Every structure is written in structure tokens, then in C-alpha cells.
Amino acid sequence: MEGMVERWNVGILLFPEVEVLDFAGPFEVFSRTRLTGGIASRLSEEAAPFSVFTLARTAEPVRATGGLVVVPTYAFADLPAVDLLVVPGGLGTRPLTKDAEMLDFLRGMATRVRRLAGVCTGSLLLAKAGLLDGRRATTHWASLDHLGKLGRDLTVERDQRVVDDGIITSGGVSAGIDMALYVVEILWGREVADETAHYMEYRR
Amino acid sequence: MEGMVERWNVGILLFPEVEVLDFAGPFEVFSRTRLTGGIASRLSEEAAPFSVFTLARTAEPVRATGGLVVVPTYAFADLPAVDLLVVPGGLGTRPLTKDAEMLDFLRGMATRVRRLAGVCTGSLLLAKAGLLDGRRATTHWASLDHLGKLGRDLTVERDQRVVDDGIITSGGVSAGIDMALYVVEILWGREVADETAHYMEYRR
């Protein structure tokens, strides 16, 4: 199977005070998707269409919201090729919207990845980097108004859990799971996405 | 607010090859629950009725399924008082069902905590430790038959996401979020649980 699958590298951004489910939901979906269904296929990586890792500014452990401590797989300086970059949200996005180095990093990545996705208030970072200019996008319900002010000609979608206008954005926290299942579906089809949701006992 | 709330210590067990969403879902729910609703209340711990941490056999980083690396808050030897112990599932439960030291640890904890909860195949560990004897319980759909063979007089519930028969158990992976919201509801009421789900944009 491995030889047959062109596996995508999925990089999930971590930063201090990233919201736990914002990154853990997509991590779960992408790391547990299998092109052949069932439980046995999850015992190995053979039928896995994604290779998932975390990345952060440095290799130091990152403290997520609530105090969960995660060791990133890669620092920015050591990053391998990324096909899909996932930008989660959380309280930690607030200082980052004023962090020129982080916004530059995101703009640079946007030119190199195949797809870029924001979860929850991760959309605010993408908007502040100018990446959502002229696009439709969404975010956590409490930040919808704020999102509209961060981009030029940015149309805020208020009633969709997942919006794909070239760059993919999702609603708050648990909607990151739907974003990830949406990506599985556009790349590998409805059946693979639904089987992954069934494995996770997640109701899409 | 802090003085008014009797805060529960929630300990979430980690082990090699623990399923990511099994522990991250409950971590998200318990760490983000607030007794006063809205976004502003999430900027501090003041109205937080739970103090959440992870625990593992040693303080060494733990590699969860898919390669997410988490640094546990406490090793078993340094554990503070735990009010609610959450036992997640994942492939890593397979060797642990034959691990006398881990089963002893769970039996000991069961005598000291106020509530004990299993997520997904975490139920298999609780059953193997004898803690589900004579009780109703559930687990991931693929392990329902196996669960029935691990306890004495254990009744397997096949159609419920959350089962509470003294010890709380839940279905697979994402059902751990429902387990956590159920605990929020029995301790703090429906309104607090629903508001937390709304904050997370999770459809109960």
C-alpha cells in the first residue's frame, strides 16, 4: 500500500497557549485516517495517507492552554517539506497577531504548502498575515466580528463550520475535527472520511 | 469566585500509544469549563471548577499514537490528590492489560478518588483490574465483545456514548468529550455543561 500512496506531510503549528482541541482534533484525524478501513489497518502506518507532525518556533516544550505540555516534532529551522499546514487557535494567537516574525513565517509557508488551514482563532493569524484578503473565511463564533476587521475585502461566513476559499478555515475548537475530515474527503473521498469519523465515533 | 468553588483535581493518565483525542478531549473540556459563561471567563482560572493535569508512570515524555509527545505533569510517585481519574484508551492499552503494576495502580487509585472514568478502550484496563465487575459499562465499538470477557458479571452497554454505573465509561475516542461534559453536568448542572459545549462549538 505504501508505495501506492502519495503521502501528505501535515504540519500542525504549536505556540504558547494554543487551545488543546484545536491542534489535537486535527492531529487525531490526520494521524488515524487509513485508506483501507477497519481497526486492523490502524495497527500500522501502511495505509496512512498522511504523515503528521507538530512544529514550533523552537524545539522547546510548548505549554498549551490548561497546562498541557507538548514537545514539538520540529523547530521552524529544521522543518521538512509541508503539504498541509494547520494553524490552530487559542488565547496564544492574541500576541502572535502582533508578532512580525510569526506573520512572516506564515506568509512564507503559504507560498510553499499545497494547502493552508486555520482552526478557530488561527484564522485571525492568517488574516493578519494578509492571507485571507479577498477571501471568504470563518473563525470561533466569538471572533467573527474581529476577523472581518483584520483583512482587506474579507467576507466572514457566520453559519458554516468549514469554509474553503482556497485557504480553509473552520469554526471554533471542535470544528477543527470537521475541517480535518473535510480535507480527508476532498483528497481521498467521502468514504474514507466517513470511515475515519466512524473509527473516532465522531458525528459529522 | 475562587474561594466559592470547591475545585476538583482531574488527573488524566498517559501511557505510550495512548490515543490522542481520548486524553485531549477530556483535557479540553475540564480545563475550559467555567462556572460563569462567556469568553472573558476563559481568560483566567478564577471561575474554573477543575484543575487538570496529566500523570504517567514516570516524568519522561510520553509518545502518544501518531507521534504526539506530551510531558506529563506528574509521575505516579509525585501525584497530588486526585478527585477524578480519567483513563483514556488507545493501542497502548493492549500491553497494559497484562501489566500487574499498572493494574495495581488503578485498583489503588479507585479507592482514593471520588470518581473514576474510562474513555474508549481505557475501559478494558478498568475491567482487567476488576473494577467493572458487577457493573454496566461501555467502550469503543470494536472492543465491546472483548470488554464483556474481561470482567465478572459485567454488562456491556452497546448503544450509549456514556454509561455511569458508579464508574463512568464512554464509547470510542470522541465520546470522551461527551463523558467529560456528562461529568460537568452531574457536578455543576446542565447549563454549565451546555455553555462549555457551546464555547467549544461541540454538538452534544
Image: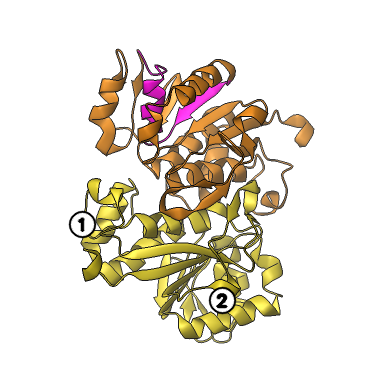
Chain colours: A orange, B yellow
As displayed, is residue B57 above or below residue A150?
A: below
> Circle 2 sits in a helix, a strand or a loop, which is it?
helix
Say left or right for A28 vs B187.
right
User: Which corner quadrant of the image does residue A162 belong to?
Assistant: top left
Q: Position of residue A118 (x, y in %)?
A: 43, 30
Q: Position of residue B191 (x, y in %)?
A: 21, 60
* Chain assignment, label 2: B
Q: Position of residue B88 (x, y in %)?
A: 54, 64
Say left or right for A126 vs A110.
left
> Which is more foreground, mark 2 or mark 1?
1
* Chain assignment, label 1: B
Residues at marks 2 and 1, CA–CA distance in whole angstroms: 34 Å
**Within-10-Å neighbours for mark 2: few <14, some 14–19, many 20+:** many
Residue at the disc numbered 2: B126
As displayed, is residue A95 above or below residue B200?
A: above
What kind of residue is marked 2? Leu
N-term mark: 2 or 1: 1
Extreme-right residue of the structure: A3
**Badge number at residue B36:** 1
What kind of residue is marked 1? Thr
Q: Nearer the viewer, residue B59 or A184?
A: B59
Quarter of the picture containing the N terminus of chain B is bottom left
Residue pictured at 46% horizontal, 47% vertical: A64
Q: Nearer the viewer, residue B175 or A20?
A: A20
Can residue A119 be seen here? yes
Quarter of the picture containing the C terminus of chain B is bottom left
Bounds of the magenta segment: A113-133
